[in-house]
Amino acid sequence: MARTKIYVPRETAAVSVGADEVALAIAQEAKKSGTDIELIRNGSWGASWLEPLVEVEVDGTRIAYGNVAAADVASMFAADFVGGGKHERRIGPIMEIPYLMDQDRWTFWRCGLVDPLSIEDFQAHSGFKALKQAFTDGPDAVIEAVADSGLRGRGGAGFPTGIKWRTVADTDGDQKYIACNADEGDSGTFSDRILMEGDPFGLIESMAIAGFAVGASVGYIYLRSEYPLAHSILARAIETARNSGWLGTNIDDSGFDFDIELHLGAGSYVCGEETAMLESLEGKKGIVRYKPPLPAHEGLFGKPTVINNVVTLASVPNIINLGGERYADMGVNRSKGSLAFQLAGNIKRGGLVEKSFGVTVRELIEDWGGGTASGRPVKAVQVGGPLGAYLTAEQLDTPLDYEAFIEIGAMIGHGGIVVFDDTVNMAQQARFAMEFCAIESCGKCTPCRIGSTRGVEVIDRMIAGEKREDNYDLLVELCDTMEDASLCAMGGMTPYPVRSVLKYFAEDFASSEDLE
Ligand SMILES: Cc1cc2nc3c(=O)[nH]c(=O)nc-3n(C[C@H](O)[C@H](O)[C@H](O)COP(=O)(O)O)c2cc1C
Ligand code: SF4
């Protein structure tokens, strides 16, 4: 008789709420009851609110049990959990959970499904199929497919990936690099992590495809140090890929050489900015570089370099497998394909939702997120990380479309959605934006380095009720200067959240004074 497969995620969010203890309890209970099980530590499906989300495979169907605690395991076994039996933790077939069913999982489809560290499981789920296809089609066809797909960078700036790859391919260089940006510093974001922990071979394959397309033989993953689990999973996957001939020289007899080095950051937000990341990768202090030259021309160690976010890269294999046009058919206007939106903050059902562009923030928050965790009304939503504007409850019907967001003075960024209920004081949030910039500024340019510190002071005066109108004008002027004269988006976009507070939540300055 085949062993029963039981899945318990080894993913940071799941582990933080006891997944390791649950896995241990299941192994012990199975031993005690003489049940022959195969315990698989999968990645997360992204439904973080259900973690630890345990599954058992019964007659080919995976039955889910949510929010399982180690203390539940004995009673689950007594209730024939191994046969998919009834228990208060039982949800039903994983593929029938609406939170997952209603997504458009183009990039994250293997997350949760496979054993992240099994290269055999990866290959049984289309792994390396796109890379092989790329070897057959040739570099130009790969770049063309990426360009046709309309894929834009998922790290924040939304730059067309096909153009970036074409530029590097067309630039002469004895050595070229792929630099994968896995710094994931934005507040409320975790999609890079879920992908790296749940489908590390998918990222390895994606980077190899990028390398093949542009003529790069070395790739770097710049990973934030706050992700130790992702680090160990990636390190093991890279080693396995090397030992299996999917990294190294003459991959799959194609004549193409490619290897990956994993590099840990040191906890700086600005090191996610691409040129500061290059400095850091070179072993220097993470300070932003002037542009030009563009990294595509002179990037890492002065060589042509593709810099892409984890999710951007991981979207590529299915573009090769299923066709660029199919990707372009998803989404709206110039926002093609899907994005992994991340629901965080004061939200009932936090997690990752991969959905085609065009979905509204309200749909994500209400239909997937179930509203606020506190049950109170939504007051503000910050989309796009710490440099993103705060949306009002009325703006939540804006479709998630890069250009539609620009029109309302906001941005989508890396798809982080942080929800606040009506107890938040938005004047404090404006102060936080300036304070964050002051702490994280690389210090290279004055508007950001000095402006952010002055910004905190001006906001403090407004909160204290000191010459509020004069200080309001001063703050607007300061925002103009930071926006116009900063070298990078750190100082250039910090005014976004501040301005949105001034425009839509100005009354909170008065109520902060009342709180003093
Ligand atoms: C202050 C700052 C922080 C950034 N942090 C990240 C980050 O953590 N991850 C990321 O992929 N991009 C980040 N970016 C955007 C990168 O500079 C760059 O646009 C991106 O890595 C390019 O990849 P993409 O085209 O695939 O998005 C940041 C930008 C700025 C200005
Ligand atoms: S805007 Fe800020 S982070 Fe960017 S270069 Fe200037 S000082 Fe550095």
Image (tube, grey):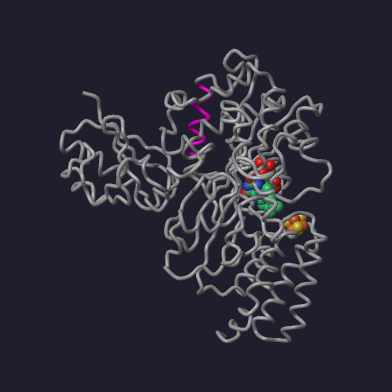
Q: How many marks?
A: 0
Residue positioned most to the top? 253
Considering only vertical position in the picture, is 503 above or below 449?
below
Report the quarter where the N terminus lies: top left
| Residue depicted at x 58% and y 51% | 415
- The magenta stretch is 232-243
Residue 272 appears in the figure? no
The image quarter in which residue 322 lies: top right
Residue 308 sits inside the magenta stretch: no
The image quarter in which residue 513 lies: bottom right
Residue 206 at what x, y percent from top left?
59, 31
Q: Is residue 141 left or right of residue 394?
A: right
Considering only vertical position in the picture, is 516 above or below 382?
below
Q: Nearer the viewer, residue 480 or 322?
A: 322
Q: Nearer the viewer, residue 188 or 380?
A: 380
Residue 290 at what x, y percent from top left?
82, 48
Look at the magenta stretch and give its main secondary structure. helix
Residue 94 at what x, y percent from top left?
35, 41
Q: Nearer the viewer, residue 393 or 154?
A: 393
Q: Is residue 321 left or right of residue 494?
A: left
Q: Nearer the viewer, residue 292 or 104?
A: 104
Q: Is residue 83 left or right of residue 301?
A: left
| Residue depicted at x 42% and y 33% | 114
Residue 121 appears in the figure? yes
Report the quarter where the C terminus lies: bottom right
| Residue depicted at x 30% and y 30% | 60
Residue 329 at what x, y percent from top left?
61, 36
